[in-house]
């Protein structure tokens, strides 16, 4: 429209073609109550994005995108895009992204539900700028060059407060008062309800990443059966973390971690795709590199940083390479191979093998490397010599095409994850820390994932297409998270000498989706043309095994108040599978035109059958808690309430179930 209408109207002529695309999304709500009492704060305040202006409700999401494309000639194209997303809410899942494979727990701040105005507010601000240049050199070769600028900031604070304004949360006895021993002469008062009435959360945090990257690749067709592609991606980062725990203690809390680092990472790769006699061979090699940054190099060379053992310093020098500017880096080569070969005209056998690297979470590297900025009652220090976590993946499958509209694919896979990070003890000789215990991170663990998947795709004319897949997989290893070593040191867990199920293991998964389209002019059952036509109906069914958990078993003992005792089954960690998940989602959309404009009205229904899917597992029953269920002794059971402070709330967290049924209606316009 720019070069076809706007510029000619202004008397401006430019070569080529200029086009523009934009998009805007706004979503604000009070969240989903799921049929339970779930209050919201009176007003959220974002300390990093215009205060209350973009936070009118409890859940606030904003997104805008703009893209300008200039096709200079048929062989040259330049594009610029910008997008920004803003999220302002009280969902603590924003701070759980470092759990790697582990599914984050529900983000509702249950203990603050009577005082949400003082609970943490999370502001997530992402901006992305990109310039892309595409140039076709000849009929067989073209290249692409991208310059990207990415910035992401997360602030977690008590509705706009700085850490020095935090106060300790307290549970105060308020009306209605709950009594006990009503049948005796000595009546007692239960000291609170477990909800914080005053004060703020335990964490104040601000972190950001400012990233500039250059990415380029070249693709060349040597002939019609041989395609070669090579490229690179160089990323330069600035990261800053300020994390303060119990901010009301001292100047910077009981525990804090503050650092600013400048790592760099990237990759170089080459791959070749060869097709001969029906067989397709795809092979390549990828080099990943990573500079931890000057912050780590200086800590390694500084003998005053006593939290780095001499053994680690020596290994770091041996395991890294020195760049021209003196900074040190690590690198890893990863081979990739893929083969597909026809067995018959309607059957194809395929196989793939590859190594995939993932550099460690920054927390595991930089945490508390500067003791002047960090303190803790139970120290866990970063390890600057961590290696990349590596996954070696194998896949073997067969694809059967019964007709042009029916395809069945059977796939078996095996993944070996090694150099998995976990905590371990560190021996540090220092008069300053002689009486303290230290833990650090190390590449000590591993995990294995193996499974099989069946997928069937079906198409009927232009009015129906669908798919169904079912998979069975098992994931085992030594530990489910990097922090498990700390729990073992504290005595909360036993050290296992054998493999155990991982917490993210979900054995069975079934997923099916169907799409029906009623063509324009062909109404359903021939009734109501113009009304019951030009309609799209989408339906998705999902089933998955429940969460892994460790069962609490009855000890045949009772407390003095008659409460049965249930104990943690240390010999069968994560052996049980919780309540299974199942839901059906549906979307119905009707298209029509008014004054040459394309409109649609739609209805989106999530969890159509309103099934209750357990998100917080009661380890006695294997499902979400309901009144009357037995509970572990560590839970505050409404049938046997705790009588001594501090208390936990009764286990009626409204987030103990996934999203219940909700329906959304809307209208869209395309022009």
Image: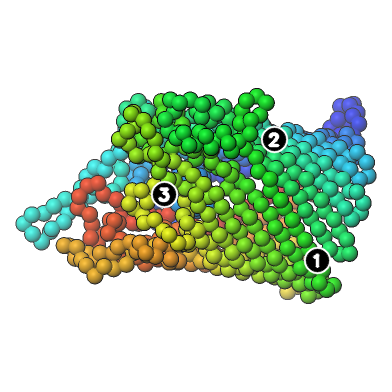
Q: Which residue lies furthest to the left in this view?
A: 185
Q: Does residue 633 appear left or right of residue 405 in this picture?
A: left
Residue 543, how many percent across, how many down?
A: 55, 67
Q: What element carries label 2?
A: strand
Compared with 359, 581 (above or below) is: below
Identify the mark at residue 234; answer none if there is no mark.
2
Q: Is mark 3 on a helix, strand or loop?
A: helix
Compared with 572, 300 (above or below) is: above
Q: CA gap, disc 2 to disc 3?
A: 34 Å
558 or 528: nearer the eye? 558
In the rendered structure, which disc, 2 or 3, sits on the residue that comes first in sequence?
Answer: 2
| Quadrant of the snapshot with the C terminus | top right
Residue 307, how many percent across, how many down?
A: 42, 33
Report crowding for label 3: few under 14, some 14 to 19, many 20 or more residues within 10 A (C-alpha): many
Q: CA gap, disc 3 to disc 1?
A: 46 Å
Residue drawn where x is 36% and y is 56% of the image:
494
Residue of label 3: 485
Residue drawn where x is 58% and y is 44% of the image:
388
Q: Does residue 188 appear left or right of residue 44 in this picture?
A: left
Q: Does residue 499 appear left or right of residue 596 in this picture?
A: left
523 or 563: nearer the eye? 563
Residue of label 1: 341
Residue 665 location, quadrant: bottom right
Q: CA gap, disc 2 to disc 1?
A: 35 Å
Residue 208 location, quadrant: top right
Residue drawn where x is 50% and y is 58% of the image:
477
Report crowding for label 2: few under 14, some 14 to 19, many 20 or more residues within 10 A (C-alpha): some
362 or 544: nearer the eye? 362
Report crowding for label 1: few under 14, some 14 to 19, many 20 or more residues within 10 A (C-alpha): some
Residue 151, how many percent across, how many down?
A: 61, 33
């Amino acid at each position: 429209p720019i070069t076809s209408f706007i510029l000619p109207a202004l008397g401006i002529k430019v070569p080529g073609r200029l086009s523009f695309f934009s998009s805007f999304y706004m979503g604000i709500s009070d969240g989903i109550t799921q049929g339970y009492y779930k209050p919201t704060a009176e007003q959220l305040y974002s300390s990093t994005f215009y205060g209350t202006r973009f936070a009118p409700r409890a859940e606030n999401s904003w997104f805008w995108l703009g893209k300008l494309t200039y096709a200079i000639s048929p062989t040259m194209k330049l594009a610029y895009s910008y997008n920004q997303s803003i999220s302002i809410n009280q969902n603590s899942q924003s701070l759980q992204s470092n759990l790697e494979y582990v599914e984050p727990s529900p983000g509702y701040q249950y203990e603050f539900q009577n005082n949400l105005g003082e609970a943490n507010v999370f502001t997530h601000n992402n901006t992305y700028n990109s310039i892309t240049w595409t140039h076709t050199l000849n009929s067989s070769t073209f290249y692409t060059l991208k310059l990207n600028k990415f910035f992401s900031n997360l602030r977690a604070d008590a509705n706009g407060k700085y850490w020095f304004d935090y106060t300790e949360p307290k549970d105060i006895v308020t009306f209605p008062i709950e009594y006990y021993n009503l049948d005796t002469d000595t009546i007692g008062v239960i000291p609170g309800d477990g909800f914080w009435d005053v004060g703020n959360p335990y964490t104040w945090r601000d972190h950001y990443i400012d990233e500039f990257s250059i990415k380029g690749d070249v693709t060349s067709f040597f002939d019609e059966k041989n395609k070669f592609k090579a490229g690179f991606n160089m990323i330069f980062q600035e990261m800053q973390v300020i994390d303060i725990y119990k901010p009301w203690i001292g100047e910077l809390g009981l525990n804090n971690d503050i650092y600013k680092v400048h790592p760099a990472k990237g990759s170089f790769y080459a791959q070749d795709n060869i097709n001969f006699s029906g067989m397709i061979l795809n092979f390549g090699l990828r080099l990943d590199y990573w500079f931890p940054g000057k912050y780590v190099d200086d800590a390694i060379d500084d003998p005053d940083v006593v939290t780095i053992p001499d053994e680690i310093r020596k290994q770091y020098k041996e395991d890294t390479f020195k760049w021209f500017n003196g900074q040190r880096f690590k690198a890893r080569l990863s081979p990739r191979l893929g083969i597909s070969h026809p067995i018959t005209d309607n059957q194809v056998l395929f196989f793939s093998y590859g190594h995939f690297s993932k550099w460690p979470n920054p927390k595991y590297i930089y945490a508390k490397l500067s003791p002047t900025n960090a303190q803790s009652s139970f120290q866990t220090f970063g390890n600057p010599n961590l290696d990349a976590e590596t996954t070696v993946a194998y896949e073997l499958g067969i694809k059967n095409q019964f007709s042009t509209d029916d395809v069945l694919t059977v796939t078996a896979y095996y993944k070996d994850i090694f150099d998995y990070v976990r905590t371990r003890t560190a021996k540090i000789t220092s008069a300053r820390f002689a009486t303290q215990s230290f833990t650090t991170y190390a590449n000590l663990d591993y995990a294995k994932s193996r499974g099989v998947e069946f997928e069937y795709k079906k198409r009927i004319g232009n009015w129906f297409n669908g798919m169904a897949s079912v998979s069975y997989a098992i994931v085992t290893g030594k530990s489910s998270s990097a922090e498990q070593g700390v729990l073992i040191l504290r005595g909360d867990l036993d050290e296992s000498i054998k493999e155990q199920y991982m917490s993210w293991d979900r054995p069975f998964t079934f997923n099916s989706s169907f799409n029906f389209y009623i063509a324009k002019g062909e109404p359903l059952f021939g009734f109501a043309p113009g009304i019951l036509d030009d309609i799209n109906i989408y339906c998705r069914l999902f089933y998955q095994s429940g969460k892994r958990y460790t069962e609490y078993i009855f000890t045949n003992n009772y407390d003095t108040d008659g409460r049965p005792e249930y104990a943690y089954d240390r010999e069968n960690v994560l052996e049980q599978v919780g309540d299974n998940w199942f839901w059906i989602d549906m979307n119905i959309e009707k298209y029509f035109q008014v004054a040459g404009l394309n409109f649609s009205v739609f209805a989106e229904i999530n969890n159509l059958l309103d099934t209750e899917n357990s998100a917080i597992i009661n380890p006695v029953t294997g499902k979400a808690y309901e009144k009357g269920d037995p509970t572990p002794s560590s839970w505050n059971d409404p049938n046997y309430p705790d009588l001594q402070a501090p208390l936990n709330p009764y286990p009626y967290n409204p987030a103990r179930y996934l999203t219940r049924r909700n329906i959304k209606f809307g209208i869209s316009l395309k022009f």
